[in-house]
Image: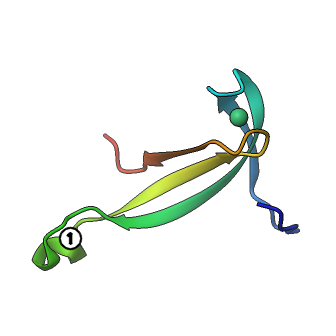
Amino acid sequence: MATTDDSFNGLTEYCEDCDLETLHEVSVQIRTESTKEENAQFSREPYRVCECQRCGNRSSQRMNNA
Ligand SMILES: [Zn+2]
């Protein structure tokens, strides 16, 4: 992202593509996993999305993983 934000949520994490620890932008997205409309309201899962600020690689991780 090219936007400059004072509240930038940066975090240093390991990036597989860069093969080193880089600055990542971290955000949380709510995704609906079910394809059945009747179940949609029960299947919204929060995902933690990390975007490498060096190579732009994105990775997401389900936050409810046991
Ligand atoms: Zn990277």
Ligand 1 quarter of the rendering: top right
Q: Quadrant of residue 55?
A: top right
Q: Position of residue 13 (x, y in %)?
A: 69, 34
Which residue occupies 52% across, 52% down?
A: 48
SS at mark 1?
A: helix
* Horizontal arrangement in the rendering, residue 14 relative to residue 22 (left or right): left
Q: Residue at x 67, y 28 (%)?
A: 14
**Coloring basis for residues:** rainbow
Outermost residue, top side: 19
Quadrant in which residue 35 is drawn = bottom left
Q: Residue at x 82, y 67 (%)?
A: 7
Asked whether, in this view, residue 53 is left or right of residue 49, the answer is right
Which quadrant holds the N terminus? bottom right
Disc 1: which residue:
42
Query: Callout 1, which amino acid?
Result: Phe
On-image quarter of the C terminus: top left
Q: Residue 53 at x, y = what percent?
A: 77, 45
User: In the displayed structure, does residue 23 sit left or right of residue 46?
Assistant: right
Return the x and y of residue 34 as percentages of the image width and height: 20, 64
Return the residue nearer the eye: 41 or 35.
35
Number of numbered discs: 1
Horizontal placement of 54 versus 26: left or right? right
Q: Image height check: is 39 above or below 27?
A: below
Establish whether ligand 1 lies closer than 8 Å to the Cβ of label 1: no
Nearest the eye: 12 or 16: 16
Around disc 1, counting alpha carbons within 10 Å, would you say few (fewer than 14), some (14 to 19), or many (20 or more)? few
User: Is 10 rendered above or below residue 55?
Assistant: below
Residue shown at the point (79%, 40%) measured from the top left = 54
